[in-house]
Image (spheres, helix red, strand yellow):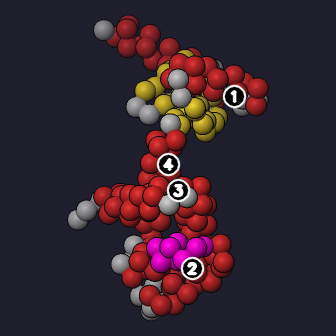
Amino acid sequence: MAEPITIARPYAEAVFKLASESNALAAWADAIANIDGVVADSRVQACISDPKVSAQQLEGLVLGVVGDKLTGDARNFVQVLVQNNRLDLMPLIRTHFEALKREKEGVLEAKIISALAMNDAQVKQLVAQLEAKYQRKVTAQVETDASLIGGVKIVVGDKVIDATVRGKLDAMAAALVN
């Protein structure tokens, strides 16, 4: 059985190619976000998993809720997902599409995990330092994790910068054991 991301990837790549060719990445990102928002609703999830709900009913539900926010191509995309029983993959399709979009735009996604809540000025300063380091635009997702005790941990792609008290304590413990 194939992994869900393996199944979702071709859909995301096809939509990304279409969006790139028509120079409409932002519009497609909005459309995918709208579709994903509808699909994420628990009532729609129940309909997706209900074998009594026909493909036409499911398609009508999604398109009815999204309304006129979708172009013809985006409506066709919903129809393809419904007909192929892939509507439940929408969150993965969105995630992969957004990653492709960021890559094309030269934007890095950073995850900043702090022991204490950070204010906007601190986040902006940290993002500016990351942009200088990587020579690319950086968007940040900020989280708080009290178990870090102090400091911050930054994850950019597969790189991790650990400047936390917890990380230093763990390193000292490992050094003492060895």
In the rendered structure, which amino acid carries the disc numbered 4?
Lys
Q: Give the CA separation, mark 4 to mark 1.
A: 23 Å
Q: Which residues are magenta?
A: 70-77
Q: Give the quarter of the image for residue 3.
A: bottom left
Rendered position, 157 above or below 65: above
Mark nearer the N terminus (4 vs 3): 3
Q: Residue at x 31, y 58 (%)?
A: 6
Q: Which one is in front in this view, the residue at disc 3 or the one at disc 1?
A: 3
According to the picture, the residue beneath numbered tag 3 turns out to be: 23
According to the picture, the residue beneath numbered tag 2 turns out to be: 62
Mark nearer the N terminus (2 vs 1): 2
Q: How many numbered circles does the render carry?
A: 4
According to the picture, the residue beneath numbered tag 1 turns out to be: 123
According to the picture, the residue beneath numbered tag 4 turns out to be: 101
Q: Residue at x 53, y 19 (%)?
A: 133
Mark nearer the N terminus (4 vs 1): 4
Secondary structure at numbered mark 2: helix
Secondary structure at numbered mark 3: loop
Q: Give the CA separation, mark 2 to mark 1.
A: 37 Å
Asked if marks 4 and 1 touch (Cβ < 8 Å), the reply is no
Q: Specify whether residue 110 is in view.
A: yes
Q: Sort mark 4 into few (<14), some (14-19) or many (20+) by Cα contacts within 10 Å.
A: some
Rendered position, 127 above or below 63: above
Q: Sort mark 2 into few (<14), some (14-19) or many (20+) by Cα contacts within 10 Å.
A: many
Q: Which one is in front in this view, the residue at disc 4 or the one at disc 3?
A: 3
Mark nearer the N terminus (3 vs 2): 3
Give the position of the C terminus as an image quadrant.
top left
Mark nearer the N terminus (3 vs 1): 3
Q: Residue at x 58, y 32 (%)?
A: 138
